[in-house]
């Protein structure tokens, strides 16, 4: 079993419902949910003409290989109505693999660690809630989050929203 971290987000329809549905669907596909961060609400990044996002990060365990996990994620996103019409545009659900054990992958279709995770407060703040001791460049994640200039835009939306069983 490999420890993984994934970010999940939604800004269309029943945003919280989509987050919950995504986790339920992942657990039916060889993914064990270990920890779930609180949900945070944030402004969109990139394409601005859309609603606010709900974002969270989950720690999981899986026996799936990275590309197998990506295939499961893509299937879950499709089942939940994800359409890729506009880059960084509105979406029912967005699931990204942030970390997969200590594996590094730099393929056209998969980059681990996620290539922009260290630039995004909406990823790092919830990740810090469940894994503050992750280290990047000799700095603990908790220290990196403290220095983020845009962390104020990541507003707590809800704690204890998903029960890990």
Image (tube, rainbow, N blue to C red):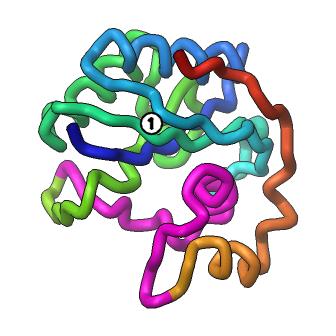
* Residue at position x 78%, y 67% in the image: 151
Left or right: 155 with respect to 34? right
From the image, tell me which residue sits under label 1.
95
Whether residue 108 is situated above or below residue 85 in the rendered picture: below
Residue 113, percent from left and from top: 33, 63
* Residue at position x 44%, y 43% in the image: 6
> In this orientation, does residue 154 appear?
yes
Nearest to the observer: residue 159 or residue 46: 159
The stretch in magenta equals: 109-138
Left or right: 160 with respect to 123? right
Q: Quick check: is 129 in the magenta stretch?
A: yes
Left or right: 100 with respect to 10? left
Residue 23, percent from left and from top: 49, 21
Outermost residue on the bottom side: it is 138
Residue 120, percent from left and from top: 60, 65
Residue 129, percent from left and from top: 67, 53
- Within the image, what quadrant is residue 72 found in? top left
Whether residue 145 is situated above or below residue 157 in the rendered picture: below
Q: Quick check: is 10 in the magenta stretch?
A: no
């Amino acid at each position: 079993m490999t420890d993984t971290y994934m970010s999940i987000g939604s800004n269309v329809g029943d945003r919280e419902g989509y987050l919950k549905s995504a986790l339920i669907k992942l657990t039916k596909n060889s993914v064990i949910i270990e920890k779930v961060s609180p949900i945070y609400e944030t402004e969109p990044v990139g394409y601005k003409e859309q609603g606010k996002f709900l974002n969270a990060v989950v720690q999981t365990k899986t026996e799936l290989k990275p590309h197998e996990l990506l295939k499961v994620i893509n299937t879950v996103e499709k089942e939940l109505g994800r359409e890729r019409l506009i880059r960084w545009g509105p979406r029912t659900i967005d699931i990204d693999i942030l970390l997969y054990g200590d594996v590094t992958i730099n393929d056209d279709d998969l980059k681990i660690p996620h290539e922009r995770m260290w630039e995004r407060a909406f990823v790092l703040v919830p990740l810090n809630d469940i894994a503050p001791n992750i280290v990047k460049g000799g700095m603990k994640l908790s220290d990196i989050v403290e220095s983020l200039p845009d962390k104020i835009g990541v507003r707590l939306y809800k704690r204890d929203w998903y029960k890990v069983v």
